[in-house]
Image (cartoon, grey):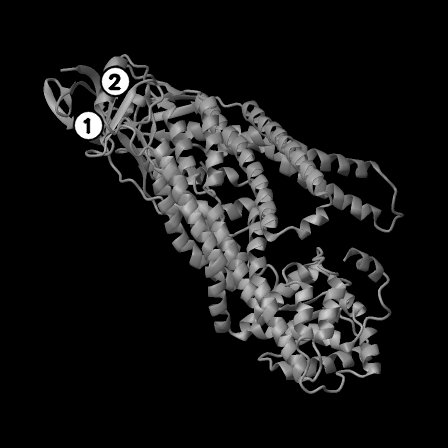
């Protein structure tokens, strides 16, 4: 029988026991001729050591009992006798493989939830959220949004009158559940946006490029479609949900960090296209109800985005192709043509709501 | 039978031939570095989940290379425990974050920054997490087959620590020694090795006296700057602008000096704090002395800055080369807009990958120096007395769960 000397800590006190270790039926630990412990080989594991000594523990006994072997040759024989010495050591290759496998599985399921689960939850959650709350969210996001662009409202009296007339006509045609708070603002970006809580901004940059009231009416109807479907609220819930999930992945629950932002943008972009198509549907419906063709709106969009060029502007980045949108709008003329929404003088007043056309429209043009 | 009457410095001779009063650190920096590098790669492919196992490996490495009286410490925690702790912490943090978000909306509507109290609440929660995380780490620390452990209430600690920190803030840092003394007393009073109780005997007054000079050179100088600015503003009122006086020059010089001095003073302050801490800690009859010098820490900080810059330059060159290749292949970046969606996603993923790689390599540098090198410097600086008083200590205390670690991870207040 092979035996050697060792130091044994029984886990009950820190007293070192000078023992003899025998490789028998079990690993027998003998102190003064008396066997004080017998460790079954399959339960023996290696404990951390840095001084060249072999430290052993057992998973089938006192948690903290340790056996320290100094004799290298004897240690070798003990190592040979213990079949599962390195088992469940996280620095071993098999368990690293398991960690990688489960991490990738967890990541995949989180990404799938981000792609399909979060939009579904947002879809179901949105109708349950009261409008008063949505308005509050709107007030918050308004503060943030207005730091990005110039949101000073344009207020020439005639222009405002024409704009309110247009809005009230559209409102009656879209059957909105909330009051609308719409403004023309000074930003020269050709865009229009809807925030949660019925806040709609039409940028003068878009107004400057429009040739007729119908073009603007179509765009506004599209934004009212977003308001009606509560798209901004839903996107907010989605964005919050996906950044939260990605935060889980990367270990930051608050969800900040550039990587998260990039990934979120990527995920969200795929969600918004459906919302755009639905808003277009409502715009077409509203224009038809008012007896006007939605086609001019499509023409305005194409004029801004240019053919196929999906530009760098937000307005189009997440939208369907302008050609496809124009095609769809051109295919839906009104059943009974109605009177113009604004007369010539009203349209002229609306165009001048911010004063004379901005000088930098030319440069904007060449950019798009 | 621990002999708590043995004075620091008196060397017990009863414990046999082994060099009893020794604390050593085995330097295997290369191995530690390789572990970090491998860990960084695994963090990348596991979307960060490997962090639980990486911090476990780091602790196992550092603990097992630290030995007291010839017997090394052992860290018995596992990555799996940390993962479970994190999941539990999520169950607590997620509802709190949702609530935080909703209440934040209500308050922000009335006034910007009205949700600051909630932010303060999260700081309080962070203190709780720190205390509980320490408890986890301590109960996973084993020496001679007996574990360290800790009791005391995490919340009691968190509330008091929070209150003391407000005092520190209001006193412009002058109250810090009293906060630190209270903090260490509270922690050590609830710390045990088996049945040997811990204590902390460091004096706040001593810390204050040794640190007041550093305070004067940083915060004191800032106060002087404010006073000078006030005087100059009062003098120049009503006079023609643009008259550049000696006072203006003084303001500029002090303004430049403060951040530079602070940068250099900080490691010296940390070294002072370590020395003061080591000298105050008691476990049973064990006491320590530290000879840590500020210059050692300063050197480590300079190395961090130097290597971080090198890493940044290295990745910058890589990004430049890849960007150049991309330009050669695609031409105008605008053309990229016409690419199919798959290529765009690949592009964004590649950028994310590069960003994460940069972050992870910075993490390797930071961990190597702030964990391994600082640990090495501190442990190597220690001398220890009265280890024999721990002979025959009986095991006590249970292994605590890793909830605190999980909370600390979620709240981003984790240390080691």
Give the CA separation, mark 1 to mark 2. Answer: 14 Å
Q: Is residue A239 left or right of residue B229?
A: left
Q: Residue furthest left?
A: A34
Near-viewer residue (B19 or A76): A76
Name the chain under label 1: A
Q: Residue at x 14, y 27 (%)?
A: A38
Q: Is residue B39 left or right of residue A88?
A: right
Name the chain under label 2: A
Q: Residue at x 50, y 73 (%)?
A: A127
Which numbered disc covers residue A75? 2
Q: Position of residue B98 (x, y in %)?
A: 47, 60
Q: Is residue B75 left or right of residue B215?
A: left
Crowdedness near tag 1: few (<14), some (14–19) or many (≥20) residues, C-alpha within 10 Å = many
Q: How many marks?
A: 2
Res. B115 image quadrant:
bottom right
Q: Assign a secondary structure to mark 2.
A: helix
Which numbered disc covers residue A303? none
Q: Position of residue A276 (x, y in %)?
A: 61, 67
In the image, residue B384 above or below residue A214: above
Quadrant where the image shows the C terminus of chain B: top left
Q: Position of residue B158 (x, y in %)?
A: 43, 48
Q: Position of residue A228 (x, y in %)?
A: 59, 75
Res. A24 image quadrant:
top left
Quadrant where the image shows the N terminus of chain B: top left
Q: Would you name the residue on which mark 1 appears?
A: A41
Near-viewer residue (A294 or B358): A294
Crowdedness near tag 2: few (<14), some (14–19) or many (≥20) residues, C-alpha within 10 Å = some
Q: Assign a secondary structure to mark 1.
A: helix
Near-viewer residue (B306 or B357): B357
Q: Are marks 1 and 2 on the same chain?
A: yes
């Amino acid at each position: 029988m092979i035996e050697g000397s060792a130091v044994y800590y029984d886990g009950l006190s820190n007293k070192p026991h000078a023992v003899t270790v025998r490789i028998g039926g079990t690993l027998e630990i003998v102190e003064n001729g008396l066997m004080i412990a017998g460790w079954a080989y399959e339960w023996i594991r290696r404990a951390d050591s840095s001084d060249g000594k072999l430290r052993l523990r057992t998973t089938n006994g006192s948690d903290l009992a340790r056996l320290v072997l100094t004799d290298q040759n004897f240690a070798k024989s003990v190592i040979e006798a213990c079949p599962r010495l390195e088992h469940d050591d996280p620095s071993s290759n098999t368990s690293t493989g398991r960690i990688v496998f489960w991490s990738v599985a967890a990541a995949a399921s989180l990404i799938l939830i981000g792609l399909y689960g979060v939009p579904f939850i947002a879809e179901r959650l949105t109708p349950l959220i009261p409008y008063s709350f949505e308005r509050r969210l709107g007030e918050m996001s308004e503060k943030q949004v207005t730091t990005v662009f110039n949101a000073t409202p344009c207020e020439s009296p005639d222009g405002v009158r024409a704009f309110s007339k247009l809005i009230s006509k559209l409102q009656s045609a879209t059957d909105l559940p909330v009051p609308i708070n719409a403004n023309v603002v000074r930003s020269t970006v050709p865009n229009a946006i809807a925030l949660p809580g019925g806040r709609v901004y039409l940028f003068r940059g878009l107004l400057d490029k429009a040739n007729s009231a119908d073009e603007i009416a179509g765009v506004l109807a599209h934004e009212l479609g977003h308001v009606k479907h509560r798209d901004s609220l839903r996107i907010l819930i989605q964005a919050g949900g996906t950044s939260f999930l990605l935060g889980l992945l990367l270990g930051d629950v608050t969800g900040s960090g550039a990587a998260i932002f990039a990934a979120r943008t990527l995920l969200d972009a795929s969600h918004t296209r459906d919302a755009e198509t639905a808003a277009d549907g409502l715009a077409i419906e509203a224009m038809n109800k008012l007896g006007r063709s939605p086609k001019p709106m499509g023409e305005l969009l194409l004029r801004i985005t240019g053919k196929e060029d999906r530009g760098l502007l937000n307005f189009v980045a997440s939208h369907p192709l302008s050609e496809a949108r124009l095609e769809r709008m051109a295919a839906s003329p009104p059943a009974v043509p109605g009177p113009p929404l604004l007369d010539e003088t009203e349209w002229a007043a609306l165009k001048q709501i911010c004063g004379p056309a901005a000088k930098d429209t030319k440069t904007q043009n060449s950019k798009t | 039978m621990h002999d708590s009457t043995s004075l620091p410095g008196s060397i017990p001779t009863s414990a046999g031939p082994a060099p009893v009063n020794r604390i050593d650190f085995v330097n295997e920096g290369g191995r530690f570095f390789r572990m970090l590098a491998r860990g960084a790669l695994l963090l990348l492919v596991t979307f960060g989940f490997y962090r639980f196992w990486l911090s476990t490996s780091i602790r196992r490495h550092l603990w097992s290379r630290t030995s007291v009286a010839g017997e090394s410490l052992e860290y018995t925690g596992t990555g799996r425990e940390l993962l479970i702790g994190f999941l539990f912490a999520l169950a607590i943090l997620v509802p709190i974050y949702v609530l935080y978000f909703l209440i934040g909306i209500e308050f922000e509507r009335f006034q910007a920054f009205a949700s600051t109290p909630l932010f303060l609440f999260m700081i309080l929660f962070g203190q709780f997490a720190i205390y509980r995380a320490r408890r986890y780490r301590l109960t996973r620390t084993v020496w001679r087959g007996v574990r360290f452990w800790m009791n005391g209430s995490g919340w009691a600690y968190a509330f008091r620590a929070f209150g003391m920190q407000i005092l520190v803030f209001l006193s412009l840092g002058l109250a810090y020694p009293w906060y630190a003394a209270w903090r260490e007393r509270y922690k050590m009073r609830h710390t045990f090795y088996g049945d040997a109780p811990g204590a902390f005997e460091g004096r706040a007054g001593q810390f204050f006296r040794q640190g007041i000079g550093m305070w004067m050179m940083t915060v004191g100088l800032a106060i002087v700057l404010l006073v000078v600015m006030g005087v100059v503003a009062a003098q120049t009122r009503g006079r023609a602008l643009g008259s550049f006086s000696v006072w203006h020059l003084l303001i500029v010089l002090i303004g430049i000096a403060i951040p530079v001095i602070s940068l250099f003073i900080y490691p010296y302050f940390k070294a002072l704090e370590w020395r003061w801490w080591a000298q105050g800690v008691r476990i049973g009859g064990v006491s320590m002395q530290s000879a840590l010098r500020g210059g050692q820490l300063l050197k480590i900080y300079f190395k961090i800055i130097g290597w971080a810059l090198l890493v940044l330059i290295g990745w910058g060159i890589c990004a430049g080369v890849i960007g150049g290749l991309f330009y050669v292949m695609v031409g105008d970046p605008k053309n990229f807009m016409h690419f199919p969606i798959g290529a765009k996603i690949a592009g964004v993923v590649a950028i994310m990958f590069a960003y994460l790689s940069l972050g992870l390599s910075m993490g390797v540098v930071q961990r190597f120096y702030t964990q391994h090198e600082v640990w090495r410097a501190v442990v190597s600086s220690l001398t220890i007395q009265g280890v024999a008083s721990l002979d025959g200590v009986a095991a006590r205390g249970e292994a605590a769960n890793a909830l605190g670690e999980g909370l600390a991870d979620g709240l981003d207040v984790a240390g080691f």
